[in-house]
Amino acid sequence: MKEIMSIQDVAEYTGWQVSYLYQLTSKRIIPFYKPRNGKLFFRRSEINEFLFSSKKKTIKQLELDATNFNYKNSI
């Protein structure tokens, strides 16, 4: 797997449309590089970090957090 990816590579990797990726880059939501030649490039590690940055907790994890919070505040 290559570390440096084109916008087409990222589209194939994520399953997102190229047009959507352009929207994300224009809003500076997704990390990217734009050297002097104007092409966009991405680092696979940064795309992975972006993709996995918004983990949602399971119900069990939320219940455990609530229990721990209540326990800490009752001491």
Image (cartoon, rainbow, N blue to C red):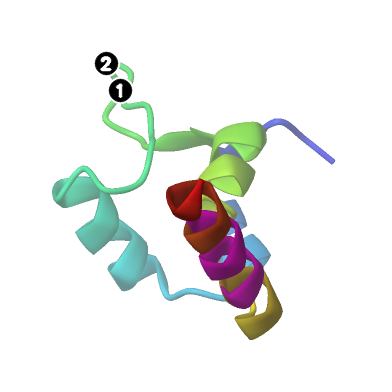
What secondary structure is the stretch in magenta mostly built from? helix
Q: Position of residue 51 (x, y in %)?
A: 55, 56
Q: Which residue is label 1 attached to?
A: 37
Locate residue 68, reporting x and y percent: 60, 57
**Mark 1 residue crowding within 10 angstroms, few (<14) / some (14–19) / many (20+):** few
Looking at the rendered structure, the number of numbered marks drawn on it comes to 2
* 8 left or right, relative to 12: left
Q: Secondary structure at mark 1?
A: loop
Whole-angstrom CA distance, mark 1 to mark 2, is 4 Å
Quadrant in which residue 57 is drawn = bottom right
What residue type is disc 1 on?
Asn
In the picture, the quarter occupied by the N terminus is top right
Q: Position of residue 35 (x, y in %)?
A: 33, 18
| Residue bearing mark 2 | 36
**In the foreground, 9 or 68:** 68
Question: Which numbered tag is attached to residue 11?
Answer: none
Q: Amino acid at mark 2?
A: Arg
Residue 7 visible, this angle: no
Residue at the limit of the structure toward the right, as seen here: 1
Query: Which x, y percent locates residue 75?
Result: 51, 45
Foreground of the two, 73 or 4: 73
Residue 64 versus residue 26 in the image, above or below: below
* Residue at 66% across, 62% down: 13
Answer few, some or many: residues within 10 Å of disc 2's Cα (few below 14, many 20 plus, some between 14 and 19). Answer: few
Dot 2 falls on a residue whose secondary structure is loop
Task: Determine whether label 1 and label 2 are within 8 Å by CB.
Answer: yes
Task: Give the answer, above or below, for where 33 lies relative to 15.
Answer: above
Q: Is residue 43 visible?
A: yes
Q: Which residues are magenta?
A: 63-69
